[in-house]
Structures are given as structure tokens and as C-alpha cells.
């Protein structure tokens, strides 16, 4: 297990978890969101291969509509 900081909250996850698996684990939608690890945006095409390191700062942002 490793600890990451997801939207400023500590979360223990399996060491080899990828971005897509994390989104599924936390029941996050996969459409209309952006994911950043340590301020670097991770493109959706990399979600299945990008994994986490101890103490990574992960930000998930939900796109919203409005004016």
C-alpha cells in the first residue's frame, strides 16, 4: 500500500493501481473530468498505464457547464 493525496485528502491505495482503476475505485465518472498528478495533467490515453508513487498529489477536476 502507498498513500496519495487525492483532492487534498490522504488515501491509501494498492501500489500498482493506475489512474483508471483509481477512478473506478472511488466511483468517479470518467467523462468530463481532468486528472493531474503533481500538477501534471494526465491525458486520458495514459490512464491505463500511469501509476502512482508514494505521496503523489492527485487532483481530479469535474468539468461544469454554465455561464
Image: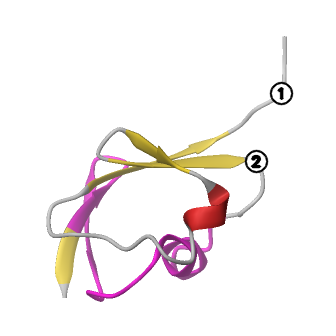
Query: Which quadrant of the structure image shows residue 65?
Result: top right
How far is the residue under mark 1 from the one under mark 2?
A: 10 Å
Identify the residue under disc 2. Answer: 32
Within 10 angstroms of label 1, few (less than 14), some, or many (20 or more) residues? few
**How far from the left and from the top, in percent, is residue 16?**
33, 88
Give the foreground label among 1 and 2: 2
Can you say whether 29 is above or below 22 in the image? above
**Extreme top residue here?**
67
Numbered-mark total = 2
Element under label 2?
A: loop
Q: Residue at x 84, y 19 (%)?
A: 66
Can you say whether 36 is above or below 44 in the image? above
Q: Which residues are magenta?
A: 4-28
Q: Residue at x 71, y 37 (%)?
A: 63
Query: Which quadrant of the structure image shows residue 62?
Result: top right
**How far from the left and from the top, in percent, is residue 40?**
39, 42
User: Which label sits on residue 28?
Assistant: none
For the C terminus, give its image quadrant: top right
Within 10 angstroms of label 2, few (less than 14), some, or many (20 or more) residues? few
Question: Does the segment drawn in magenta span residue 50?
Answer: no
Residue nearest the observer in this picture, 7 or 51: 51
Residue nearest the observer in this picture, 58 or 53: 53
**How far from the left and from the top, in percent, is residue 56?**
23, 58
User: Which label sits on residue 65?
Assistant: 1
**Label 1 or label 2, whichever comes before in sequence order:** 2
Q: Relative to residue 67, is residue 54 drawn left or right?
A: left
Element under label 1?
A: loop
Q: Relative to residue 9, is residue 60 drawn left or right?
A: right
Question: Does the segment drawn in magenta span residue 18?
Answer: yes
Amino acid at each position: 500500500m502507498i498513500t496519495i493525496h487525492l483532492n487534498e485528502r490522504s488515501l491509501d491505495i494498492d501500489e500498482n493501481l493506475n489512474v483508471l482503476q483509481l477512478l473506478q475505485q472511488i466511483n468517479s465518472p470518467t467523462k468530463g473530468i481532468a486528472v493531474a498528478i503533481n500538477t501534471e495533467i494526465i491525458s486520458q490515453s495514459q490512464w491505463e498505464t500511469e501509476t502512482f508513487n508514494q505521496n503523489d498529489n492527485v487532483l481530479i477536476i469535474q468539468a461544469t457547464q454554465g455561464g
